[in-house]
Image: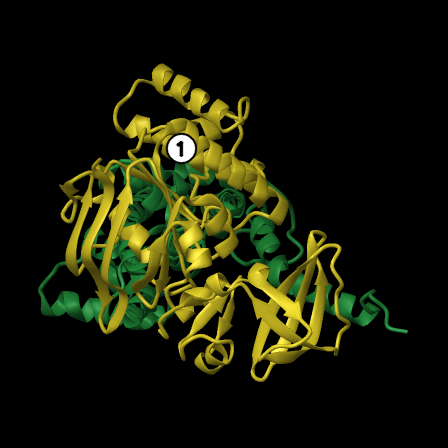
Amino acid sequence: MHSDRPSLLLKITAIGGLLFLHLPILFIFLYAFTTEERTYQFPPPGLTLKWFSVAWFDRPDIWPPLYLSLKVAAIATVLAMILGTLAAAAMSRARFFGRDQLSLLIILPIALPGVITGMSLRSAFGIMDIPFSTWTIVLGHATFCIVIVYNNAVARMRRLSGGIMEASADLGANAFQTFRYVLLPNLGSALLAGGMLAFALSFDEVIVTTFTAGQQSTLPIWMLNELVRPRQRPVTNVVAIVVFAATFVPILIAYYLTRGGSETAGMGK
Amino acid sequence: MTAAVEFQNVSRHFGTVKAVDGVDLTIAEGSFFAMLGPSGSGKTTCLRLISGFEKPTGGAIRIFGEDVSSVPPHLRNVNTVFQDYALFPHMNVRDNVAYGLMVKGMGRAQRHAKAEEMLALVKLDGYGDRKPAQLSGGQRQRVALARALVNEPRVLLLDEPLGALDLKLREAMQDELKALQHKLGLTFVFVTHDQHEALSMADHLAVFNEGKIAQIGTPQDIYDRPATRFVADFVGSSNVLPPELTRALGGPAQWASLRPEATRLATSGPVTGTVTALRYLGSGTRVVIRAGETEIAALVPAGQPVPAEGATTAIAFDPQALHLMGAA
């Protein structure tokens, strides 16, 4: 007889797979508390909270990269939310020749390896004599942040009963009123979710940033540099915990926002 | 009396597709007008031409005498009950109904009072706080109706308004819509592919076929005197007789229609056939007779003898009931 219960072997494999994926993250947390600062030796010889205070009080070099990362992520997200929403609105309203190809072009940056995006941007900046600045990093990040917002908005617009925009016009609303009272409230949570994902992605991006940052350090790049230095290694782990919180929480919120959206948007049947 | 809606040689072509092609139409004020036809016949496009979501590629459309060809939908004094209702999912029922008043700038208290009035009219008092997702199909339909009516439109357009409801609810809503139209004295224009619905509700109807109007008239006209074979076939209640059969029955060699109620069975006659189906209807029995290639239905009133299936019988009819029509 066929059994619905998974076999023991399958269970062990599944648990093994999950551990392989997630155990390293726990080790990063663990080594933020180790007393040993040069090598990541296991088991840790002792546990301490000292590195948190070291990171907070004695390491001023952490703060500029952190500020830069926050600033870049914030600007890239705002830019992505405006451009991504506009692109999604245009694509869902208009029917024109080459629409599918254009849609692919908008999505492409997220499928393209970061190295390619980074290289092409860097050479473009070089050709145009644009010096590296916060804005060159923002531009690099915006390429994939726009896609995130765009995808979220397009999916939500597809689920919206197409008739509600027409219904709004039929009831006497002009285009602005329809946008303000009908489109925006229905799109809101999808845009917020897209924005949060975009922020999280931008905040920990390394590859494109390496090509477009020049001498500047964002937080992930600072961490990469820190790992090759032999002193105060656990401080990097402390920062890693902060990065983890800063990216994981928005992603979680985004997940719940888009999940709840199906109930309100699904009424058109 | 001015016409509520007037089409003058109106066309709407999409490239080579002639969705609406040279339609002339006059809808009298205060009438309950139905546009009937199979899908793709142009009836919905005509409705969208009135609401303004489609622009004619030719001809003129007038609403109460005013040429509306360049008036956008939101400035037309007509409202629509959409096929899928298109209620705003993020608003409660009261705000849905008050939407048209809100965008016109009416104050909150006043528009909510008006919305409650309308909800009472469609028998949904007390449902104001619910979200559309918490309503049944029939209730959503009433909300859509209230939301359109609150704007006091001069013409109310209904796009297959009962299509999504089950049979029992549909029949109840047919009566209610009719009563509501009577009470408000408004012009209702509704689109349907259901011939029974059109015949029972409308006081005038247009039958559409391939972008053109095949016939326009009262339900009685359409039912008793279909102008073309298409109308007779689509309305479906009449027997459609090919020219040779009409001649065999004593008429000219033309297509003709013959209502089952006017068709009788006889022991002998020029046309005979075999009984292929019997259906008991309560008030009588519907007998289907196959004569050559044609099936002819006859209604035998209750109390009269009914032939057995497979029996041979002749067909007789009241000569006045035979209605000649064009072949198209």
Q: Quadrant of residue B127?
A: top right
Disc 1 is attached to a residue of which chain? Answer: B
Determine whether B55 is above or below B146 in the image.
below
- Counting from the top left corner in percent of width and height, residue A155 is at 42, 56
Numbered disc 1: secondary structure: helix
- Identify the residue at image location x=33%, y=35%: B30
Q: Is residue A230 left or right of residue B188?
A: right
The mark tally for this picture is: 1
| Residue sitting at the far left | A129
Who's yellow, chain-wise? B
Residue closest to the far top: B109
Q: Split into 4 quadrants, where in the image is the N terminus of chain A?
A: bottom right
Chain letter, green: A
B254 up-or-down from B235: above or below: below
Q: Which residue is mark 1?
A: B147
Figure quadrant of residue B270? bottom right
Q: Picture coordinates of residue B9 (x, y %)?
A: 18, 58
Question: What amino acid does circle 1 point to?
Answer: Arg
